Image (cartoon, rainbow, N blue to C red):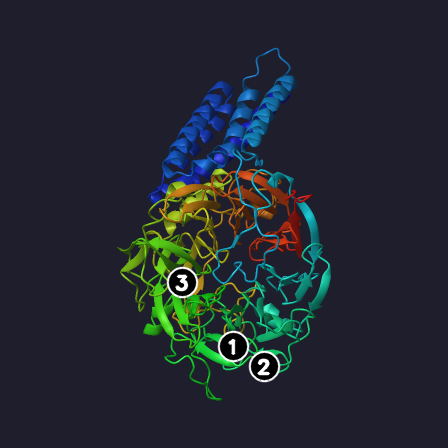
Amino acid sequence: MNARRILFLGLQTLTGLLGAAMTALGLWLVTLGGTAYYLVTGLLLVAGAVVAWRGRPATAVVAGGVALLVTLLWSLVEIAGKGWMESWGFDLAGRVGLLGALVLASAVVGLIPLGTRPLRTVAIGAVGLLLTIAATLAFFWERPGTARTAVAVAPGPADTDWTAFGGTNAGTRYSPATQITPANVGSLREAWRFHTGDLPEQDGRVFFSAQNTPLKADDTLFLCSPRNRVFALDPATGREKWRFVPTIVPRTLESAFSVACRTVGYHAAPGEGAAICARRIFVAVADGRLIALDARTGRRCPGFGRDGTVDLTAGMGLKEPGHASSNSGPSVIGDMVVVGQQVSDNQRRDAPSGVVRAYDATTGALRWAWDAKRSDARAPLDADQTWPKGTPNVWNVISGDAGLGLVLLATGNAGNDHWGGNRDPEDDRFSSAVVAVDLATGATRWAFRTVERDRFDYDSGAQPVLTTLPVGGAARPVVIQATKTGSLFVLDARTGRPVTPVDYRPVPTDGMPGDRLSPVQPQSVAYPNLSGRPERDPERIDARHSWGLTPLDAALCRIQFHRMRYDGIYTPPTGKGLGTLLFPGTVGGMNWGGIALDPARGVIISNHSRLPNRVQLIPRADVADPAIGDGGRRPDQAVAPQKGAPYGVDRPMWLSPLGVPCIAPPWGYIAATDLRSGRLLWSQPLGTGRDTGPLGIPSQLRIVIGTPNLGGAVTTAGGLTFIAAAQDHYLRAFETTTGRLLWSARLPAGGQSSAMTYMHRGRQYVAIGATGHARFETKLGDALTVYALPTPPAK
């Protein structure tokens, strides 16, 4: 037996083994009502291997060719039928790649004409295959381009401030800066970098994810790190002016759902000039303290609370650490410091209260405490009382408008996300809602639910955005609420009534015994739904969306799909089979990065993830979890206990055995929507495979696939949108009106934070926290990275 035949039989054996596995999985899939493709193709591959061993190489090659042709036609039909043609190349490669490589290699070796040199022919075939792969990679490789047209912009201010997470308490994430434009953004360079030194230990017990957006006030940049350390920096150089390092008990961090510090609060007392604490920074510490610092020196403000500190655990009844913490930071609205908190998901029905509290920014005195079950927000709490247990919390950034006298709360769920048979009416009334609270009294002015009786964890993660919109010929203040379900709800800021149409559509109600589900769910119809492919209705996936890097993991994902319940975006949680497929999933849709609004151009920029979960309810008798009654969900917690419900819950991401999503790419994208007309202006996948890959191994390929993303964008008067957020380590600049990628910069770690920009002494800077996200499995770091043009343009 010569070398050519040995090589040919070896390739055919591998192809036959692949075919045998496809046949077995295909038979299982057919019994579940799925496609017959895997069964048919597997049998062809097995037949080819058998005849190859019987000395009929040409017949074996023909069988493989037919299998490859069937695969190609089947793939193209499915890809075209489900949409998302932007990532068709990556989708096609996953379906055809491995099988095609084996079949083509077998054909090259098996059909070598007699009398030729086998190695030379094999080499020629290999070179051809490599050239084809290289050309494909080059076609899909991400490359920033140039602006197609010059954008005329008026001169912007010489200095700007960024005094809240979203720029202002309106949360628009917009800057009037115009120095950096589509025409010159390609020249942007790193100006300076600052390292906080706040990195996790290597024991895997703490989920670090700083998520911080710095503030810029007067002549100082303020940022915080995961352990709530606060730094004051020179905006032009990054030189440290001061730092504040609180002492936190390690057990608190080990038990927290995530260790983050999205923002600090800033307050300036009018007319006090250089007095001590005339300007102050507020930081919420993970162990339940609200601390006021002098913005000039970093020292505690002695007149605030007790020695500069207010105890946020008062009235919470907390016995174990980690159940609740304010990782989004305080919002300063008028002369109030308003603080919500994250309560660890699905631990217990009697979780800590979701109470939102407002303190006097000068004295630290409690002014009011809003809660779903408190009729009088200013009523004092007796010494032996606690705030109501298990009520909806506000874990994201709080918005407000001192002029309107409003505080805007986007709420999460009452204790336990996925079973609510023992919720009170107030819990469901205020879960997954936008609630407008009176700034002075804490009284509820209005509430609008974005999900009715939420059992899906579609809580409101995005910060509410305040703007004005022409309605009936007059400018009206409105609130825009982006949701995990992909809806953009536009509400009258004074009344909470929808300004744009909202439909209430029938949904399934056959949930688990004892639960009460809503027969309808709200859907905004004025804007494209952004839970998946941007269309007027929420994206509904089917088996065609199942995907894998090889035929085997793709088949396993299809089998899982058919073993789960899926009836659209509001499929009730179940304990049967493999549970419920939850899409767009607990990440979203739109999450805490929120939206960015360019009011001058009337454009909403939003970024989204398409990352389904498998949600399976586990009977109480089968929940044996060491974390029951303990702190927040830890890395060693297999099932979230949902204590107080008949079921625990397991809700992993829907991933293949190779650790990649079971849904075909893109897994994340960015879109632009016209605020006034609701027209989709553009959308495209966001993120490449550069820093992700199967089994957690980065592919090193900057191929645009669209990765899951967390973090938000910033828009500028100069016509640009800056965003990181994706699972690769890049900050990108897009032209706001066209979506054209104009610039990108490599970050030292994951960019799971929201970018910001500011003017300082006539120069525009763009800043992003490159600190990564442990739960998102991006590289962790401690850097604030700041960019500017090499030389500011002449005025």
Q: Between residue 294 and residue 546, name the one nearer to us.
A: 294
Measure the C-alpha gap from mark 1 to mark 3: 40 Å
Task: Give the number of the disc on residue 316.
Answer: none
Q: Give the foreground label among 3 and 2.
A: 2
Q: Amino acid at mark 1?
A: Tyr
Task: Give the position of the N terminus as an image quadrant.
Answer: top right
Residue 694 in the image: state x and y as whole percent. 56, 44
Query: Considering only vertical position in the picture, is 594 above or below 311?
Result: above
Task: Give the number of the disc on residue 305.
Answer: 2
Residue drawn at point x = 57 percent, y = 42 percent: 181
Q: Give the foreground label among 1 and 3.
A: 1
Residue drawn at point x = 39 percent, y = 79 percent: 374
Task: Name which of mark 3 and mark 2 comes first in the sequence.
Answer: 2
Q: Between residue 229 and residue 179, name the one nearer to us.
A: 179
Residue 67 in the image: state x and y as whole percent. 44, 28
Query: Considering only vertical position in the picture, is 394 above or below 784?
Result: below
Task: Name which of mark 2 and mark 1 comes first in the sequence.
Answer: 2
Residue identified by numbered label 3: 617
Q: Residue furthest bottom?
A: 383
Is residue 164 shown left or right of residue 470?
Answer: right
Q: Between residue 267 and residue 539, name the one nearer to us.
A: 267
Residue 444 in the image: state x and y as whole percent. 37, 73
